[in-house]
Image: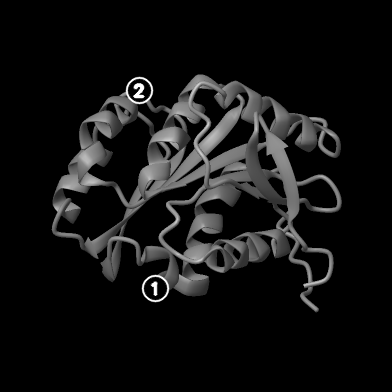
Amino acid sequence: MEGSSPLKIEVAGRKVRGLRAFGPSPGLLLFPAGWHPEEVYLTLAQKLWLENWSVFWTFERFTGHENLLFEFLWSLLEETSPRPILWVWGEGPGIVPALKLALEFPQISGVILDTFLAEQREEIKGYLSQLRKPHLILHPQEDPSLTFTEAEKMFMLSPAHAKKFLLVPGARAGETLVKGGDLYIHTLLDFIHPRIRRWKRVKKTSH
């Protein structure tokens, strides 16, 4: 895909990758679990980039430095967008940092959460009970450690009005992204785009 080679950035001594759109665009920060080869996450980022998103991702945790990460990405988006929009996506262990960032910075518009982990359930419950921003939660059907029913009860803790909870049929923990394929991308964008109406959904052409 021409023009979609990832940027390599360091923020607070931690590595961040990114694909920047050529003009004004909404931004999405990914906190992947690392369950898949990096190429899987690069493909996710490229498909979103083709939908005119600026996408950034990191496998490192920014505990204590979340403000530096947010401020850096916000400044990048401000270079092309007078009123930036930034969403956050967290997968597995990346859900907690995604929630923390969304709760700490009012500028973040919304959150996508993929696969709750049983060992983080109490921490996630605490954050969800405070979350009033739009959010989409996806959870695998075949996860015996944290069932779909329990995940749905956690989802209900959030006081947000704009929220959605989806079961990923036949998926186990760590499989929602790869099993979902292009439908996964469309599900994310179908949830987000009505909430950022001033951005036109303009798809680039891959080469």
Q: Residue 124: x percent and y percent? A: 29, 33
Q: Could you tell whether 62 is left or right of 53 in the image?
A: left
What amino acid type should be assigned to the residue bearing mark 2?
Gln
**If the image is split into quadrants, where does the C terminus sit?**
bottom right
Return the mark for residue 130.
2
* Rendering colour mode: one colour
Q: Residue 167: x percent and y percent? A: 28, 60
Q: Residue 18: x percent and y percent? A: 70, 50
**Residue 163 appears anywhere in the view:** no
Marks 1,2: beta carbons within 8 A: no
**If the image is split into quadrants, where does the N terminus sit?**
bottom right
User: Which quarter of the figure has residue 159?
Assistant: top left
Question: Element at badge 2?
Answer: loop
| Residue nearest the observer in this picture, 108 or 142 | 142
Residue at horizontal 35%, vertical 67%? 175
User: Which quarter of the figure has residue 120?
Assistant: top left
Q: Could you tell whether 139 is left or right of 118 in the image?
A: right
Q: Residue 4: x percent and y percent? A: 77, 63
Residue at horizontal 39%, vertical 28%? 131
What amino acid type should be assigned to the residue bearing mark 1?
Lys
Residue count near mark 1 (Cα–Cα under 10 Å), binned few <14, some 14–19, many ≥20? some
**Above or below — where is 101 with respect to 15?**
above
Q: Could you tell whether 84 is left or right of 124 in the image?
A: right
Mark count:
2
| Residue nearest the observer in this picture, 123 or 27 | 123
User: Which quarter of the figure has residue 69?
Assistant: top right
**Residue 70 appears anywhere in the view:** yes
Return the mark for residue 179.
1
**Above or below — where is 1 with respect to 166?**
below
Q: Earlier in the sequence, mark 1 or mark 2?
A: 2
